[in-house]
């Protein structure tokens, strides 16, 4: 089946990690800052983690619909994205903790696995960075 573009995000960033970024539609307009800096502003790793978390939840929703399963209303994904130096080169690694409270274990595990296969962020990082995806209990 030929590729069909569903949506194109258009952003403009200036000033690097000490700058700003905005989307063409004006919905995103953020000041950027370095990780751990005291100045106001988010950093690219936080934006990536937020986008991945939201996309992962939506991917599990797709998988759940295909299986005629209802996800819990309080489903959540906590993402941690590490920026690190390894032999002088910057890299990323990530952990996704998925909470599907009240679901039976086998169904929850299947939906997490399917979500990781479907999610475009997971696909983009697969084989490129270390990623750990875990099913966790809420509040753990």
Image (cartoon, rainbow, N blue to C red):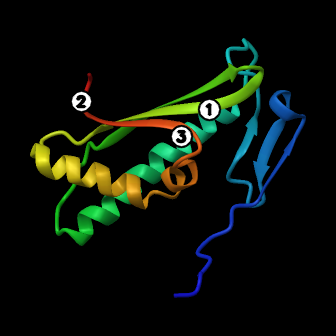
> Is residue 20 depicted above or below 106 in this figure?
above
Q: Which residue is mark 1?
A: 92
**Residue 102, percent from left and from top:** 12, 41
From this viewpoint, is residue 138 visible? Answer: yes
Residue drawn at (52%, 49%), measured in percent from left and top?
Answer: 126
Please name which of the two marks, 1 or 2, marks the residue nearer to the observer: 1
Q: Quadrant of the C terminus?
A: top left
Spot the residue most to the right: 15
Q: Which residue is mark 2?
A: 138
From this viewpoint, is residue 42 visible? Answer: no
Label 3, residues with CA under 10 Å away: few <14, some 14-19, many ≥20: some
Residue drawn at (33%, 65%), measured in percent from left and top?
Answer: 62
Q: Is residue 133 left or right of residue 102?
A: right
Labelled disc at residue 50: 3
- Secondary element at tag 3: helix
**Residue 47, percent from left and from top:** 62, 39
- Disc nearer the start of the sequence (1/2): 1
Q: Is residue 33 left or right of residue 95?
A: right
């Amino acid at each position: 089946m030929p590729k069909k573009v569903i949506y194109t995000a258009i952003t403009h960033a200036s000033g690097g990690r000490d700058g700003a970024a905005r989307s063409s539609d004006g919905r995103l307009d953020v000041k950027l800052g370095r990780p751990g800096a005291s100045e106001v502003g988010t950093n690219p790793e936080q934006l990536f983690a937020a986008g991945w978390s939201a996309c992962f939840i939506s991917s599990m929703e797709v998988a759940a619909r295909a299986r005629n399963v209802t996800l819990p209303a309080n489903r959540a994904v906590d993402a941690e994205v590490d920026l690190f130096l390894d032999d002088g080169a910057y890299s990323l690694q990530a952990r996704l903790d998925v909470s599907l409270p009240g679901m039976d274990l086998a169904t929850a595990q299947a939906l997490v696995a399917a979500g990781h296969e479907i999610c475009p962020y997971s696909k983009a990082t697969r084989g490129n960075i270390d990623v750990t995806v875990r099913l966790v209990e809420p509040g753990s």
